[in-house]
Image (cartoon, helix red, strand yellow):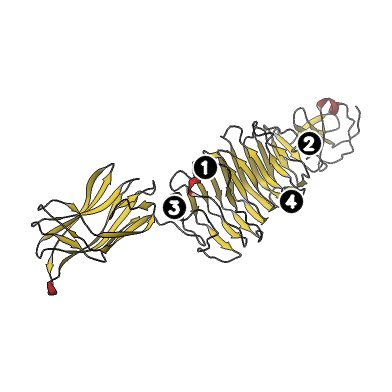
Amino acid sequence: MSREIKNSSFEVRPDHHTLAEINELTPELGAIVFDTDSNVNKYWNGAEWEFVGKANEIIVNQANAATTLGGVIVSSHEYFIDGIIDMGSNSITVPPAGITLRGYSFDISGLTSSVDNHKMFVSESIAIGSGNIMGIDFYIETTGVGSKVFELYDSNGFHAIEMNRVNYMNCTSLGDIYDYRQGLELGTGRFGGSPSLTLHGTWVGGFRISTSITRSMSDTTTEPLFKAGTLFQMNSRFLTDMNVDLGTLQPFTDFAPLNFPNPSSLEFVDVLLTRDGVINAEDANITPNVSEADICSAWSGNHGIHNTFVGGAQDITVEVETVITTQNVSTPILGTSVASDLQHFDAPANGQLRFLGTSPIEYSVSWDFILDGVSNNEYRIELIRERSGTPTVIYGQTRVINALQGGRDVAYYSGAHHERILQNDITYWQVKNLSGTGNCTLELGSDWTIDHR
């Protein structure tokens, strides 16, 4: 084979040839070719072909996109996206050994396709699957009807998808990712279109989207930004601090508590969320299947979306006399209580609060009690923590019953106590008469709360 290369400058991008083909060329000075045997660019210096560029770099341009990114991926090399490249109907088949892509920036480098039903990144098959995807400094645009960015299956469930400074522009969908270990986005953007990302299967790691922005979403899409797919389960945390402006009908996520088996693993932290530019945290379509109170949720510092306030309260609504049969022996305080504002707590029995979560464990218990008892008797209330079936007094407060006008003899108890409360610990109150066996009654309006510090 003999072929003259007309390239006369480094700025002209290389044709692809085997080493044998390259050795038969009669190039002009400055010609560049891509050696497909060694996967490097070579430059004709007038006497011989010499290596140019990084040793592990494949430069991708419009002329060679079909045979580089659209061909067999060389996982040991970085694919450098030199400009805006229209992939057309060509997909990037990510092998089990993965792919690394880099560009100049998301203003200068990009991968685009306007073809209907196009998939930008795919696996060879479900059985073979794909490996890591590492992307830095470029943008992706898939605008065709039915098109998507990803349709990927992890080859063994232990790979990652990491995108740094990558923008998704006018994408019809971000697509589907199956059984990856984890995902990470830093400095990403979603602009235009309906870039819904569906997570399927079991993710043993987590997914974090940090310093990310979403704007100009479709006002007709009903697909959420983040969607729970088939048998989706996140065994670590999903965390984001996104700045998001949703479309008119678009949810933020349709995740449900069953997708997060571990407490406090759905973390929305410092999120700024609007819909059509308006903040409304009461919008039921932001997270239609999960709330800030669910055990999986740990939402804090947010604007436009609710925050989680771990704790609970008990209020006396019906007075019931507590019978004391033995002096200086404790008994649970009676009275009908109503539990309220339970977040990561429940009320397993009347007057009790039980912690269901795992974090945080530092809490403040506060109370405001009015106890009616025998005049001039000393009564001691005791805060009980029951752990693994064993009750322990963790705090006590003693008061003398005052003789008040009108026959009403009461003592006032109030205060706060800091305590470590672990998962499934039960907290409640007891009382004992230090002076005799006179009964007592906790009056209406008495209440106590648990809040994390």
Amino acid type of the residue that numbered disc 2 sits on in the rendered structure: Thr
Give me the disc on residue 233: 1
Report the side of 410 relative to 8 (left or right).
Answer: left
Which kind of residue does numbered mark 4 sit on?
Answer: Val
Q: Which badge, 1 or 4, is on the more N-terminal residue?
A: 4
The answer to whether the residues at label 4 and label 3 have Cβ atoms under 8 Å apart is no
Which comes sooner in the sequence, label 4 or label 3?
4
Q: Residue furthest top?
A: 20
Residue ID for mark 3 = 294
Which numbered disc, 1 or 2, marks the residue closer to the eye? 1
Label 2: state its secondary structure: loop
Q: Give the CA separation, mark 3 to mark 1.
A: 16 Å
| Sequence-first disc among 3 and 2 | 2
Rendered location of residue 295, percent (x, y): 43, 50
Q: Which quadrant is home to the N terminus?
A: top right
Q: Nearer the viewer, mark 2 or mark 4?
A: 4
Write down the residue under mark 4: 145
Calculate the distance from the C-alpha at mark 1 to the C-alpha at mark 4: 29 Å
Is 234 on the left-hand or right-hand side of 14? left
Pick the front one: 103 or 376: 376
In this view, the residue in front, 38 or 216, is 216
Q: Residue type at mark 3: give it.
A: Asp
Q: Position of residue 436 (x, y in %)?
A: 8, 57
Which is nearer the N-term, disc 3 or disc 1? 1
Mark pair 3, 2: CA separation: 50 Å
Q: Residue at x 12, y 67 (%)?
A: 402
| Mark 4 Cα-neighbour bin, 10 Å: few <14, some 14–19, many ≥20 | some
